[in-house]
Image: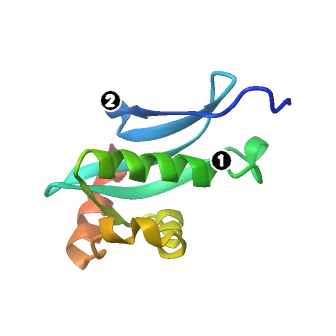
Amino acid sequence: MTDSAAPVVRRDDARHRYEILLAGEVAGFTAYRDHDGRRVFYHTVVDDAYAGQGLAGQLVTHALTDVRDNGGRIVPVCPYVKQFVTKHEEFADLADPVTPEILQWVRTLDGN
């Protein structure tokens, strides 16, 4: 694999996720659903073939910037997104707490 192609991040509203692509191939995604006016991020994954390249960080940075640019707020249910927000204070102002109600709601998404 070469590094000649820069990663591209796109929002796929139909699939409720942001995807990061390398050479046109989906290398990873962060899944979300909108709930009560907030974007709830509940799962992030990067394919093992692309591990260690910083793609998850680029993906989440893009996703959170997109939410901010659209005047939104997030709920970081996904452990990666939660850790990311903790480490990157510039996004802390976007995050609302994960509540038992949100966790229960996310569990209903498993069939989707």
Residue at image position (20%, 73%) is 101
Residue sitting nearer the eye, 35 or 96: 96
How many residues crowd around disc 2 within 10 Å: few (fewer than 14), some, or many (20 or more)? few
Residue at image position (81%, 33%) is 3
Q: Residue furthest top?
A: 24
In the rendered structure, find residue 55 and report the number of the disc placed on it: 1
**Is residue 111 something that shows in the picture?**
no
Q: Quadrant of residue 73?
A: bottom left
Q: Whole-percent x and y of residue 74?
A: 30, 60
**Element assignment for label 1:** helix
Q: Quadrant of residue 17?
A: top left
How many residues crowd around disc 1 within 10 Å: few (fewer than 14), some, or many (20 or more)? many
Q: Amino acid at mark 2?
A: Ala
Residue at image position (31%, 74%) is 98
Mark 1 or mark 2, which is nearer to you?
Answer: 1
Q: Is residue 103 left or right of residue 89?
A: left
Residue sitting nearer the eye, 85 or 26: 85
Residue sitting nearer the eye, 82 or 106: 82
Q: Residue furthest left?
A: 36
57 to 76, vertically: above or below: above
Q: How many marks?
A: 2
Q: Amino acid at mark 1?
A: Leu
Mark 2 — residue?
Answer: 14
Q: Whole-percent x and y of residue 94?
A: 31, 65
Q: Is residue 105 left or right of residue 81?
A: left
Q: Is residue 30 left or right of residue 101?
A: right
Q: Quadrant of the N terminus?
A: top right
